[in-house]
Amino acid sequence: MASHAYTRRLFSGTAGAAGNTQSTPIPCKAEKEAIFYVDITAISGWLDIEIQLWNPLTDKWHKLATFDRKTTIGTDEGFVEYGIGEKLAIQYELSGTATFSVDVTLK
């Protein structure tokens, strides 16, 4: 049986050092694998991106994975197998500003 994969956007836009640094969560209940894609089109300073999963019993977010600190325009990807949880979001921290997107393909 072929597995069904679909891609969702976790974040897209220009961010600064102040303000909300967590993306709007997306639901993901039956998926077992995730490929995360980062695309940075402009950056001044540095950008740290953390993939988070939500624990419904404690109503808290937990770190699932992190990307290496970004300081230049470019792309990156990361793969997670098992333990994806019910909701995913990103948390980011930066100095300066960055225009970037983070997408995830769930399967």
Image: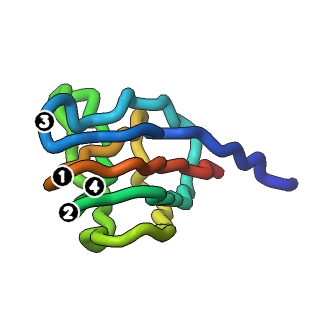
Q: Quadrant of the N terminus?
A: bottom right
Residue annotated with mark 2: 45
Amino acid type, mark 4: Glu
Query: Rounded to the nearest whole Å, what is the CA distance between mark 3 and mark 2?
Result: 14 Å
Query: Rounded to the nearest whole Å, what is the CA distance between mark 1 and mark 3?
Result: 9 Å
Element class at badge 2: strand
Q: Nearer the viewer, mark 4 or mark 2?
A: 2
Residue annotated with mark 4: 50
Q: Measured from the top left, where is residue 43 in percent x and y?
A: 33, 59
Q: Measured from the top left, where is residue 81 in percent x and y?
A: 49, 64
Q: Based on the displayed image, in which of its 4 quarters is residue 2 positioned? A: bottom right
Element class at badge 3: loop
Q: Are marks 1 and 2 in contact (CB under 8 Å)?
A: yes
Query: Rounded to the nearest whole Å, what is the CA distance between mark 4 and mark 3?
Result: 17 Å
Q: Earlier in the sequence, mark 1 or mark 3?
A: 3
**Crowding near the residue tagged with mark 3, few <14, some 14–19, many ≥20 C-alpha atoms within 10 Å:** few
